[in-house]
Image (cartoon, rainbow, N blue to C red):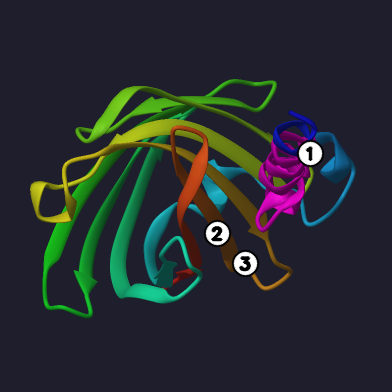
Amino acid sequence: MKLLLVFAVLLVVVLLWGPGSGFRLNRLQDFAGTSPKLDIREAMAGRMISEGVIYGPSGKVASRFVAEMQGDWTGNSGEIGESFVYDTGNTQERRWTLTVSDDGKITGTAPDIVGKVEGQQMGSAARLTYRIRLTEEAGGHVLSVTDWLYLMDNGTLMNRSQMRKFGITVAELIATIRPVE
């Protein structure tokens, strides 16, 4: 019985403080007052290019991609189109519809999003959460996603995302999003 209790405590510690726990400990308030100030209506407007790597649950590279993006905004509402080309040669299209309120709250949808995107921008960062349905080729699973976007001084956005299933991290994405002149 004592051994089971010790095992249960260790399992909780590993799940809460194991790999990726620092990601979950980020707080948007930590970026209040930081600069450059991120406004996704500006940072994700016009033509952009994104290069990224997706890591599987073991931390091994599972996929790489390059995406061409186009952001078009009218006031607080916008659409961001993404055209992905993966290292396998597979392609994928996504079109986000987003709204940013005056206090920095972000809501939105996309065809492969289950429910709504919810987020907030503050200082030089933004945090988005949503559930995404993977393509059938990728298993068709629905994953819970947390995106962190960080605006760099040169206008590049750094994107770090974690994807979870049943609370367990199954993938992580690191990508840049840069304006194209």
For badge 3, the amino acid type reads Gly
Q: Which is more N-terminal, label 2 or label 1?
A: 1
Using the image as rendered, state which of residue 45 and residue 6 is in the foreground. 6
Work out how far the residue at label 3 is from the one at label 2, CA to CA, in angstroms.
13 Å
**Residue name at image x 39 percent, y 26 percent:** 108
> Residue 85: percent from the left, percent from the top?
20, 72
For badge 1, the amino acid type reads Val
On screen, 159 above or below 24?
below
Q: Is residue 22 magenta?
A: yes
Circle 2 Cα neighbour tier, 10 Å, few/some/many (<14 / 14–19 / ≥20): many
Q: Mostly what secondary structure, the magenta segment?
A: helix
The answer to whether residue 122 shows anywhere in this view is: no
Work out how far the residue at label 3 is from the one at label 1, CA to CA, in angstroms.
49 Å
Residue at image mark 1: 6
Q: Which is more N-terminal, label 1 or label 3?
A: 1
Work out how far the residue at label 1 is from the one at label 2, CA to CA, in angstroms.
38 Å
Give, as a single range, the part of the protein colored magenta: 6-28
Residue at image mark 3: 155
